[in-house]
Image (spheres, rainbow, N blue to C red):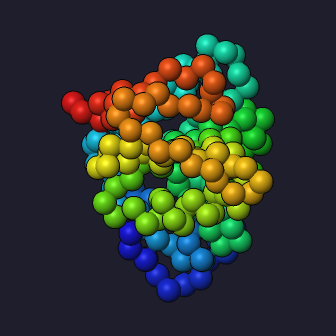
Amino acid sequence: MIQVSEKIYSFEDYCQYNYQSDNHYELVDGKLVLMNPPTVRHFLLAKFLEMTFDQLIQKKALPLICFRDAGVRTGWRKSRLPDVFITTKEAASELLDESAIFQIPPLLIVEIVSPESVTRDYRYKRSEYAALGVDEYWIVDPKNETITILLLEEGLYEETVYNLSDKLVSRLFSELDLTVNQVLVSGNM
C-alpha cells in the first residue's frame, strides 16, 4: 500500500478522480492510497466466491447482486475496494450511471488477505465495516488456511474462525454448503 500524494481529497473528489493508469486506489483519511496488484491466487479466490454467491442468488431468485472491483464508502474521507461484496439490486440500480462506490452498507463483504494487507484487513477494515453496519464480513486468509466470518451484533463483530475442514456458516446464505478447503483450493491452478 503506497500513499500517492499529500493532497487531501474529499469523497466527491475521489469519485471524480481521473485515473491515469489501470491502478486502483482507496481513499484513506482523504489520501489516495495505491493498492498493490493482486496475485493470481487472489483473483482465483475472488472469482470462485463471486461465482458461488451468484449461483446462490440465482438459485433463490434473491434481489441481490455480487460485485468485484467496486467501492464502498466507509467514512467521511474513506472509501475501500473490497474483493467481493453483496448488495441489493435496488442499491445498485441507483448508481447505474455513477461511480460504482456504494454509500450504503453492503450485506456481506469479503476481503482476501495478502502479505501487505494483514493489518488493513483484520484491523482497519474490520472497524470501518462494523461502524458502517456491514452485517457479515469474511476474511479469507490463504497463508493461515482460515476464513474468519464476523457477524454484526449490537454494533460489534462476533467472530468465528473456520479451519480447513470446517463448513462455513453464513447469516446471509443459510443454505451455503462450502468448506474452507473448498474455497482455498479454488486459488490453485
Q: Nearer the viewer, residue 140 or 74?
A: 140
59 in relation to 160, above or below: above
Establish if 101 lies above or below 184: below
Quadrant where the image shows the N terminus: bottom left
Q: Residue furthest top?
A: 59
Of residues 113 and 86, the one nearer the viewer is 113
Q: Position of residue 158 (x, y in %)?
A: 63, 50
Residue 154: x %, y % from top left: 77, 54
Q: Residue furthest bottom?
A: 6
- Residue pictured at 62% horizontal, 27% vertical: 173
Q: Is residue 112 visible?
A: yes
Tell me the residue at 24%/33% (across/down).
188
Q: Quadrant of the C terminus?
A: top left
Q: Quadrant of residue 61?
A: top right
- Location of residue 76 (image quadrant): bottom right
Determine the residue positioned at 55% across, 23% down. 176
Q: Is residue 60 left or right of residue 26?
A: right
Q: Where is residue 124? Give x, y as percent.
A: 54, 66
- Which of the pair 65/7 is nearer the observer? 65
Residue 98 seen from this side = no
Identify whether 17 is placed above or below 54.
below
> How many discs mark residues in the rendered view?
0
Which residue is depicted at the point 51% across and 65% down? Answer: 123
Q: Is 134 on the left or on the right of 43, as rendered? A: right
Residue 156 at x, y = what percent?
69, 57
